[in-house]
Amino acid sequence: MIAFGRAAGGPMNPERTLTVIQKQVVACGLCPRLRTYCAQVAAEKRRAYRDQEYWGRPVAAFGDPRARVAIIGLAPAAHGANRTGRMFTGDRSGDFLYRALHQTGFASQPESVSREDGMRLSGAWITAPVRCAPPDNKPLPDEIRNCRPYLERELAALPELRVVVVLGQIAMNVYLSILKDRGAIRSRAAFRFRHNVLHEIGPGEPVLLCSYHPSQQNTSTGKLTAEMLRQVFEQAANRSG
């Protein structure tokens, strides 16, 4: 078994490897339903953004090739990352996430509005199981399976990885499916999703840290507060140091 980021000698050039993966992501056409939906949203636009050019394609992951913490979300938002072309950029979920990352030293600034806003991540990599915006934020099982190899390859290309933060239960299930298929765990049933709970996977494996997703539904109802999310990344920083 080879743990994420712990292959003998590690990747010779993680930045180059991750760049290649991201180019493949952006060019991907494995899910016609998602590609059609992203293009339709980009053409019709939301009134507030009618003067902007939408990205309208699969969205690459974003961050530090030497990341010690990987953050796994769900999928691009139709008028967020599908518009801006960068993970968690241009929507309220991203506002919530980047504020917490800035407070805990992972992000260079507290908000992210475009790919050209100067945002830099230090020690963190933001990715997702699905790279195209799905209708109603609900990717189909086949679409998750189609996209999973990109996530798996990214995680394997991060040589310093120590902590994996999953934002929501879907992200956790996908990550656990990767671990199970690699033989790193015997069963997903042993891992219960609870906010800010950390799971030890095994020798040489990054620890798994759970968080509610910073969706507008969770943050507007108080299920996830700014303080709760900050605490998650404080724990991630402590475990990754």
Image: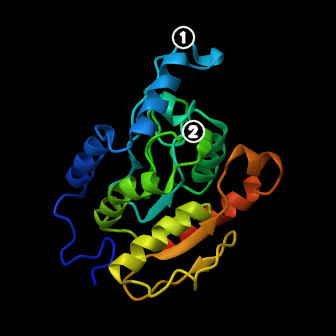
Q: Amino acid at mark 2?
A: Pro
The label on residue 180 is none
Q: Secondary structure at mark 1?
A: loop
Classify 10 Å Cα crowding around label 1: few (below 14), some (14-19), many (20 and above): few
The residue lying at 46 percent from left, 64 percent from top is 69
Where 90 sits versus 156, above or below?
above
Across and down, in percent, residue 89 comes to 54, 37
Q: Nearer the viewer, residue 43 or 226?
A: 43
- Identify the coloring: rainbow
The residue lying at 75 percent from left, 58 percent from top is 227
Q: Amino acid at mark 1?
A: Asp
Where 211 sits versus 218, above or below?
below
Is residue 188 found left or right of 47 in the rendered image?
left
Across and down, in percent, residue 43 comes to 48, 18
> Along the polypeptide, which appears first: circle 1 or circle 2?
1
Q: Nearer the viewer, residue 84 or 240?
A: 84
Q: Nearer the viewer, residue 238 or 138?
A: 138
Q: Is residue 125 visible?
A: no
Q: CA distance from mark 1 to mark 2?
A: 23 Å
Q: Secondary structure at mark 2?
A: helix
Which quadrant of the rendered structure holds the N terminus?
Answer: bottom left
Q: Is residue 4 visible?
A: yes
Across and down, in percent, residue 64 comes to 37, 53
Where 115 sits versus 186, above or below?
above
Across and down, in percent, residue 202 comes to 44, 87
The residue lying at 48 percent from left, 73 percent from top is 176
Q: Quadrant of residue 9?
A: bottom left
Mark 2 lies on residue: 135
The label on residue 51 is 1
